[in-house]
Amino acid sequence: MGRHDWTAYDCCVLINACAQNKSWKIALRLFRDMEDSDVKLDIVTINATSSVSLKAGEWEMASHLFDLMAQSKTELDTVIHNTAICASKEGDLWQKASHLFGIMVHNSVEPNAISHNVAISACEKHCKWERSLLFFMATACSIVEPNTITHNALISAWTKGKEWERALGLLSGMAQGSIERSSITFNAAISAQGTLGDWEKTLQLFSAMAKSDMQLDTITFGAAISACEKTAKWEKTIQFLSKMMQVAVES
């Protein structure tokens, strides 16, 4: 069977096979050959190629695929919308990510947790915490339950926006709502407490993190040391440095 005899199914199988072997460039070349031929594109193939584009760092290609589908009469699903939002986030296009989320809602496509999380993160990268908050609040009007990633993204947005009290308030809310907190959550909170100059609460957060199974990393120690340094607590700084060396030896 020659290349021009391929069907959309054949191409999709090959693209997925290349994706499994991390042969991103070959997968994208197959899709471009498909575009240049008479093979009819379908949503399954587009979704597979979009996923490959993201993994290959080809943000423009992922956006092109969404535009391609939008121009056709093919019904766009949650996956293709999410991929386009992810592409905009990775391409540092927070406004486009926000716009695509709006298009998703306009097209009566139900956003899922990934949709909200990526939109929040896209705005967080550019310190647009007000917009991040809107996407977080939008979960209340949907069936989506904000998870650890959702909260972390908003905490990070507030930290970058110097809204320290808000970030710490959300951290407390996670505990009250029995939402699992990760090392990312604690690192952001430790950084916020450090900026506020409250080294005692910083120490409490550090201790709680150390007692759990969470991994202490350079960000954790850096934020804790910075908090003590700002309040001239050199004794605590030495303690953190000693602990850091101990963790390094144990790992």
Image (cartoon, rainbow, N blue to C red):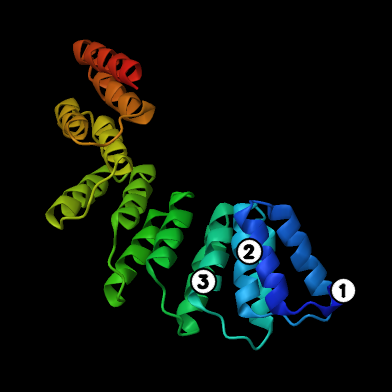
> How dense is the environment of label 3, judged by Cα within 10 Å: few (below 14), some, or many (20 and up)?
many
Horizontal side of residue 61 vs 129, given as left or right = right
200 to 94, vertically: above or below: above
Horizontal side of residue 176 vs 24, given as left or right = left
Mark 2: secondary structure: helix
Looking at the rendered image, the disc whose residue lies closer to the viewer, 3 or 1, is: 1
Inter-mark Cα distance, 2 to 1: 20 Å
What residue does disc 3 label?
A: 79
What residue does disc 2 label?
A: 16
Q: If the image is split into quadrants, where does the C terminus sit?
A: top left
For image coordinates 33% across by 71% down, the residue present is 138
Provide residue 149's location: percent of width, then percent of height. 34, 54
* Residue 82 in view, yes or no: yes
Q: Earlier in the sequence, mark 2 or mark 1?
A: 1
For image coordinates 84% across by 75% down, the residue present is 1
Mark 1: secondary structure: loop
Q: Nearer the viewer, residue 155 or 178?
A: 178
Give the amino acid type for the residue marked by disc 1 in the picture. Answer: Gly
Residue ranking furthest to the bottom: 73
